[in-house]
Amino acid sequence: MAAFATKPFCGQSGMGTVDTFRVECARQMRLGPAIFLISLLPTSALAVGQGEAELSGGFGLAIALQGQTHAGAQAEVRLLRGLSDSWAARLGLQTAWYPADGAMPSSHITVQAIGLTWAADVLRLVPFADLGIVVADIRGGGAVARQCLGGQLGVGADYLVSRHFTMSLLARVDYFALRLAGGHDTRPTQLTLALDLGRAF
């Protein structure tokens, strides 16, 4: 390395240094394409870095598990605030609509969530996991309106379209374990699958 540093041009000759130049130049030529490809990647592999924020929203499928399976549609909005390169605080709002199905009338579930998101750095594809606490307002379905407290677990992946725009595929389970007010003492569970578009700023 010392010889190469003092003789910067490939092919330059000198007493006992020609072979060293050839080896160092070959190494530089092999590393060149890799350095070029790395330079094309985003400056950070995570859409939300420490001190940054991301707002995303999208639509998807919802499935309610209470007595019988009931499929519907859902919309959601998420706000992430980066705590580090891997962890982010999360606020979320989801609303799911379930159409009438036979003897079961239509219903909808609105969920507010607060939690943490952990993400792994894998170039442009960033898998992550969500964990949070939710408060849900459940109406319709032949029951009196009620409010429940529960937990939320999700897994998904962000695809980094650019440094500031992401597309996310996210699957979640919401379990409303504790009735806060209204209705009868049921513990419904909701599964959701959503495709989101996000903007980091």
Image (cartoon, rainbow, N blue to C red):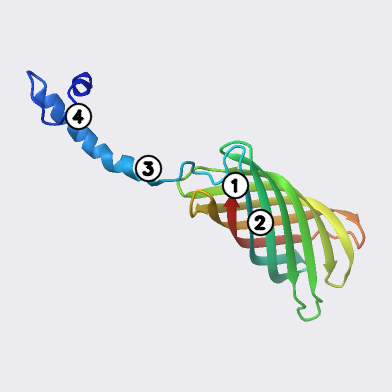
Residue at coordinates 50% horizontally, 42% vertically from top-left? 121
Please state if 30 lies on the left or on the right of 191 as rendered: left
Looking at the rendered structure, which numbered label has been put on residue 201? 1
Residue on which the image places disc 4 = 24
Give the vertical position of 150 relative to 28 (above or below): below
Percent x, y of residue 173: 69, 56
Q: Residues within 10 Å of mark 4 (few under 14, many from 20)?
A: some
Give the spatial CA distance, label 1 vs label 2. Answer: 25 Å
Q: Nearer the viewer, mark 1 or mark 4?
A: 1
| Amino acid type indicated by mark 2 | Arg
| Amino acid type indicated by mark 3 | Ser
| Element type where label 2 sits in the image | strand
Percent x, y of residue 197: 58, 59
Q: Nearer the viewer, mark 2 or mark 3?
A: 3
| Amino acid type indicated by mark 4 | Glu
The mark nearer the N terminus, 1 or 2, is 2
Q: Residues within 10 Å of mark 3 (few under 14, many from 20)?
A: few
Please state if 101 lies on the left or on the right of 26 as rendered: right
Find the residue positioned furthest to the bottom.
102
Residue at coordinates 18% horizontally, 32% vertically from top-left? 25
| Amino acid type indicated by mark 1 | Phe
The mark nearer the N terminus, 3 or 1, is 3
Percent x, y of residue 190: 72, 61
Q: Residues within 10 Å of mark 1 (few under 14, many from 20)?
A: some
Quarter holding residue 179 = bottom right
Residue on which the image places disc 3 = 39
Please state if 84 lies on the left or on the right of 15 as rendered: right
In this view of the protein, which residue sits in the foreground, 198 or 159? 198
Give the spatial CA distance, label 1 vs label 4. Answer: 42 Å
Residue on which the image places disc 2 = 172
Please state if 27 lies on the left or on the right of 35 as rendered: left
The mark nearer the N terminus, 2 or 3, is 3
